[in-house]
Image (spheres, grey):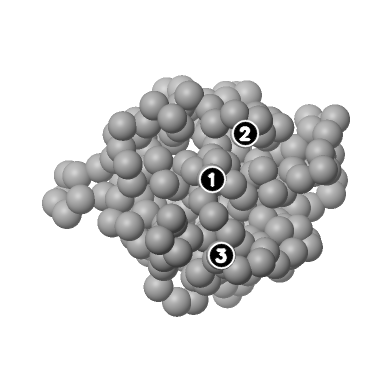
């Protein structure tokens, strides 16, 4: 899921681990109008919107948005065909993951157009140190495809936190960011991240972190001053037979964890 100094791993690192948690927010706050950027910083073309905190009342709208613009096309999901074919098909475990994240500690955000439509979503949460044992929510996950994603996320998390690098630090984690396809290239992704940085400073976080499974989200973070701290090429994350677990289409070649000090 979307998703910092890149340290390359040796080839053929074996699969293990995983992580979950997510958040939605409270206190609807309308901020200055932005005009969106998902993978580009092109100028606005007259599409006005504001950014506000996600509340529990927004959960169903958020899930509907993510079903349309994120679940099927996110590189990891697409690589293993997590979402079955069919207009109304979904992954219930992924929806639960997003539902938990959407309402955690008033940290998640959405961009809303002047007509009231959601045009961008960012799910954030407070990062916790990875447990030594695999969490039950991963072990007990009944969807084998989604379990693969959870274990990859945990594996990345364990390596990012190697040697207890962020012990005692408050880390704001950007977990999912998605923009309406008709609004991409107009600064929304950038505006959402900038607002997350602002909230992180207000709430005394030490760092903002994003594990980017997409080349485009990584490029966006890098353009906003985030530093790569860990990189895992998909070709190095293999199963017991030595075959890559995930093989997303180009240009998505690795998961890169980015951090920004606040």
* Residue 159 located left or right of residue 25: right
Circles 2 and 3, Cβ within 8 Å, touching? The answer is: no
- Would you call the spot at circle 1 few (<14 residues within 10 Å), some (14-19), or many (20 or more)? some
In the rendered image, residue 95, in percent from the top left (x then y), is placed at: 36, 35
Query: Closer to the camera: disc 2 or disc 1?
Result: 1
Circles 2 and 1, Cβ within 8 Å, touching? The answer is: no
Q: Nearer the viewer, residue 35 or 10?
A: 10
In the rendered image, residue 143, in percent from the top left (x then y), is placed at: 30, 37
Residue 218 at least partly seen: no
| 171 versus 41 height, above or below | above
Element at badge 2? strand
Q: Does label 2 or label 1 sit earlier along the sequence?
A: 1
In the rendered image, residue 177, in percent from the top left (x then y), is placed at: 52, 50
Residue at left 59%, top 29%? 133
Residue lying at the far front of the rendered structure: 241
Residue at left 45%, top 77%? 250
Tell me the quarter of the picture where residue 212 sits: bottom right
Q: Which residue position is annotated with label 3?
A: 12
Q: Does label 2 or label 3 sit earlier along the sequence?
A: 3
Residue at left 14%, top 51%? 86
**C-alpha gap between disc 2 and disc 3:** 31 Å
Element at badge 3? loop
Residue 158 at least partly seen: yes
Q: Which residue position is annotated with label 2?
A: 125
Residue at left 56%, top 65%? 12
In the rendered image, residue 157, in percent from the top left (x then y), is placed at: 64, 44
Q: Nearer the viewer, residue 250 or 231?
A: 231
Element at badge 1? loop
* Residue 59 located left or right of residue 261: left
* Residue 227 located left or right of residue 48: right
Q: Which residue position is annotated with label 1?
A: 16
């Amino acid at each position: 899921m979307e998703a910092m100094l890149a340290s390359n791993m040796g080839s053929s690192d074996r699969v293990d681990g995983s992580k979950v948690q997510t958040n939605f927010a409270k206190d609807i706050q309308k901020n200055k109008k932005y005009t969106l950027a998902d993978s580009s910083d092109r100028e606005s073309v007259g599409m006005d919107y504001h950014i506000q905190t996600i509340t529990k009342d927004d959960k169903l709208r958020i899930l509907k948005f993510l079903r349309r613009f994120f679940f099927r096309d996110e590189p990891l999901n697409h690589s293993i065909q997590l979402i079955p074919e069919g207009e109304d098909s979904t992954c219930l475990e992924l929806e639960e993951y997003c539902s938990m994240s959407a309402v955690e500690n008033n940290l998640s955000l959405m961009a809303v157009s002047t007509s009231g439509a959601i045009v961008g979503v960012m799910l954030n949460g407070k990062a916790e140190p990875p447990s030594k044992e695999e969490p039950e929510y991963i072990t007990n996950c009944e969807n084998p495809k989604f379990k693969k994603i959870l274990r990859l996320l945990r594996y990345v998390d364990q390596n990012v936190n190697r040697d207890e690098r962020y012990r005692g630090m408050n880390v704001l984690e950007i977990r999912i960011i998605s923009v309406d396809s008709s609004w991409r290239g107009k600064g929304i992704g950038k505006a959402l991240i900038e607002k997350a940085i602002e909230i992180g400073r207000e709430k005394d976080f030490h760092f903002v972190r994003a594990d980017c499974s997409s080349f485009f989200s990584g490029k966006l973070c890098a353009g906003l001053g985030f530093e790569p701290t860990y990189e895992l090429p998909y070709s190095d994350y293999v199963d017991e037979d030595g075959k890559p677990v995930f093989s997303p289409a180009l240009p998505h070649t690795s998961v890169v964890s980015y951090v920004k000090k606040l």
